[in-house]
Image (cartoon, rainbow, N blue to C red):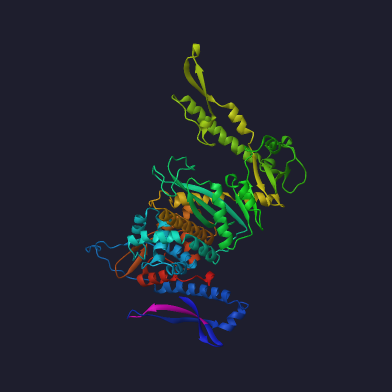
Amino acid sequence: MYAAINGTGKNKSVYIMHSYRKPDGKTSSRVVRRLGRLDELLERFSGNQNLMMDWAKEEAKKDSTEYSAKHGNVSVSLSQSVFIQKEEERSFNVGYLFLQQICTDLRMDNICRNIKSRHRYTYDFHAILTDLIYARILSPSSKLSSYSFCQTLMEPPKYSLQNVYRSLSIMAQEASFIQEELYRNSNFIHSRNTKILYYDCTNYYFEIEQEDGDKCYGKSKENRPNPIVTMGLFMDADGIPLAFDIFPGNQNEQTTLKPLETTIIRDFNCSEFVFCSDAGLGSKNNRRFNSFGNRGYVITHSLKKLKKEDKALALSPTNFRRMGSDKFIDLRTIDENADEIFNTVFYKEIPVVTGEMDETMIVTYSPKYKKYQQTIRNRQVERAEKIINKPGKKRKGKNQNDPARFIKETSVTSDGEIAGHNVYELDIDRIQEEAKYDGFYAVITNLEGDVGEILRINKQRWEIEENFRIMKTEFEARPVYVRRDDRIKAHFLTCYISLLIYRLLEKKLNSNYTCEEILSALRSMQMTLLSKNSGYTPSYKRTDLTDLLHKKFNFHTDYEFISKSSMRSIIKSTKNISGNHK
């Protein structure tokens, strides 16, 4: 059932229509009931036709439910002595239909048509790109496995595996155009908040020994001794990815920012924003770049790397304040065990003048954060003691979270200064040095005004870390099963678009469910073909989440039985632009 406006001139009315299939196989429709004259209904909704049509659609949905209850019983003939058809696919995923609706609203078909006008190919580029996205979200693996998985969708591929590999070069060439268009079109689904932009980098290693193209030896986030490529990612203030690019693994991360940000400013029409990143990407050059125009920045700042006199000033317990108060507080006078104090964040502002740049360093102190750091370090010290008590040579600490960094090695000589043996013990000086920073945190900014808002901007950086986690774990961006640089970029483009679509889906579900819950639900939504000429039955568990998915996308795959014609109608509906994009 659906709502429609029929009539001519001033004699228009709103009807609920029912689509059906005639005995000859042709489709038609009939009027179920008349809701009223268009002009009279518009008066009820203060002239707002969109609100009026939303109401009409709800009425159509009610009629559909009643009709199914009265006329929905079907008979399916199954035999205990007839084999199922050999090589016939009988289990299909329908979770992709929700993703297909988002791809439709993002106008992926139009983007791909524009790309086709610039290239010569005969395969269905749109189908390949969207199928790779569905496979990355629902069953991440190699391109070959993705192609096999797509055979289990309600609309199996009509292209060849060879077409998939050929299309990767086109994806790489058009990556910037695709990102730009997706950003513009995503505003129809969720209004993008570009007042604050977050940037970070990660890298992906390849299980090879020799450098090749962009795959170069560099500083691996996972401490792997393999060539890597670096991904730079921008995210908006709502945690939705904005743009990405791939850089050689040996390129300094600080130099990846400017080219990608310049592209965003030029092509995305985003020129007024606050840039937020971590200390590793907040070099003086990057801060200066974000001082021009109407841009500002909030960057985490390492207290450990400050000059001696600046460090002493930052860690001094005096001149701290509470949010919203002008009264200065000496941290030595507070009772950190009191609940109110324990959950309070104290801060002080320190002007920083470096040449032509006027900046402010905001140092915060949190008893709660101090307790957290102490707990983590105590556990690491315990692990270091266990390493010491084990026989054999001890390894050196690899990073700031490695408990082996607390182990000190001392060479002991025998009489006559003959080489003896090594003694391992806890490095008490190192432990005490790290303890000095417990509870302290710092950011540097060129913004003026509300300190609480500046700290809130920085606090949200966790979401870009989560975006990387989703790509690496849930979407299995690594291992990368392709080797050519263009195909590597195409691979990460599909990972990026998958992340964008997932985030938009998350927003559509009001952020009420975790990533694991949403993906688990989509991946489990299988339909079983009962017989060749009848239809399907769901073989997944109906939950509050699946109910919400069907409500938000305005179609149902959770009836006990769905005829083939009804399933075709559902598939067709996911290829039509939804109301919020009209």
User: Is residue 17 within the magenta segment?
Assistant: yes
Extreme residue in the top direction: 416
Residue 482 position within the rendered picture, expressed as x and y whole percent measured from the top left: 38, 52
User: Can residue 544 be seen in the rendering of this structure?
Assistant: no
Seen from the viewer's position, the closer of residues 491 and 430 is 491
Is residue 506 in the magenta section? Answer: no
The overriding secondary structure of the stretch rendered in magenta is: strand
37 is higher (above) or lower (below) than 199: below
Q: Is residue 49 left or right of residue 147?
A: right
What residue is at 43 percent from the left and 47 percent from the top? 215
Between 361 and 93, the one nearer to me in the picture: 361
Residue bounds of the magenta highlight:
14-23
Examine the rendered structure and indicate whether residue 132 appears above or below residue 56: above
At which x and y percent is residue 24? 32, 81
Kindly give the residue lying farthest to the right in the view shown: 327
Does residue 70 appear left or right of residue 385 in this picture?
A: left
Residue 579: % across, % down? 52, 71
Q: Residue furthest left?
A: 81
At a point 52% along the width and 60% down the height, the residue shown is 504
Quarter of the figure with residue 267: bottom right
Q: How many numbered circles are shown?
A: 0
Q: Position of residue 46 (x, y in %)?
A: 63, 77
Rendering quarter of residue 510? bottom right
Is residue 491 in view from this perspective? yes
Quadrant in which the N terminus is drawn: bottom left
